[in-house]
Image: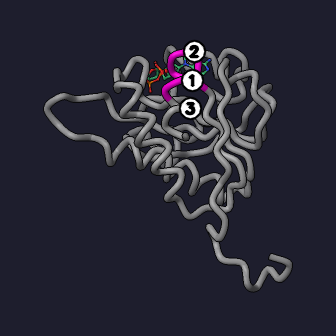
Amino acid sequence: MTDPRHHERGEADPAITLVQGDITRESADAIVNAANSSLLGGGGVDGAIHRRGGPAILEDCRKLRASHLGKGLPTGRAVATTAGDLDARWVIHTVGPVFSEAEDRSDLLASCYRESLRVADELGARTVAFPAISTGVYRWPMRDAARIAVATVRAAETDVAEVRFVLFDERSYAVFAAEVG
Ligand code: AR6
């Protein structure tokens, strides 16, 4: 790809890497937050990111709510803010679906990964760290969430070079590792 005129988005698939641990300790161009529509904070990854990232992230989120996201960020969409004190340039906030037995919301979960990578491309981020979106408070079964996450990233047309899944515990790490193969 020496001639940028011949470069087409998504020519090479992103490398998928796996890490077990706390995503707020990662160093990446962008760290993805499993947020809620309010963008004003919560528990789980969201709480950890705001705690370690400091008040600048919430300040940006409030600005988004005061401007074009007055009603909040819809499920399946993504938006970027500063990363504050985190070792990253941006936090990309996305809202996963709450798991439902009655309704298949897989497309919305896939959309979180796709939209986050689209925002990453807009920013020029090359390394992006993701948590296992929707698998905590939103109760999505880990195996199914891993299947959707890995398949969606593999199918994505993106200039992101590395997608790093950061899994909080041993079990979720093992599930993702089995999925990546
Ligand atoms: N680093 C990496 N993974 C983590 C961390 C961390 N520091 N902390 C938790 N996890 P969750 P959701 C794992 O609940 O299901 C919030 O209140 C966790 O074990 O953070 O999308 C938001 O404001 C699980 O596997 O996100 C929303 O209201 C995964 O991250 C709601 O929760 C996701 O768990 C979103 O729920």
> Taking 96 as reference, is 157 above or below it?
below
Residue carrying label 1 = 173
Assess whether residue 173 is covered by the magenta stretch: yes
Marks 3 & 2, CB-CB < 8 Å contact: no
Name the amino acid, label 1. Answer: Tyr
- Identify which residue, 94 or 14, lies in the foreground: 14
Mark number for residue 177?
3
Q: Quadrant of residue 45?
A: top right
> CB of mark 1 within 8 Å of CB of mark 2?
yes
Residue under circle 2? Answer: 170
Identify the residue shown where x is 35% and y is 25%.
141
Q: Secondary structure at mark 1?
A: helix
In the rendered view, does 51 fall on the left or right side of 140? right
Say which element carries label 3. Answer: helix
Quadrant in which the C terminus appears? top right
Q: Gap in Å between the C-alphas at discs 3 and 1?
A: 6 Å
Residue farthest toward the right in the current orientation of the protein: 2
- Tell me which residue sits at (45%, 35%) in the image: 146
Q: Is mark 3 within 8 Å of ligand 1?
A: no
Going from N to C along the chain, the mark reached first, 3 or 2, is 2
Residue drawn 46% across the image and 51% down it: 152
Q: Give the crowd class for mark 2: few <14, some 14-19, many >=20 residues within 10 Å.
A: few
- Whether the residues at callouts 3 and 1 have beta carbons within 8 Å, the answer is yes
Where does residue 147 sit, x and y in percent of width and height? 42, 40
Q: Which residues are magenta?
A: 167-175
Residue 147 visible in image = yes
Specify the amino acid type for callout 3. Answer: Ala
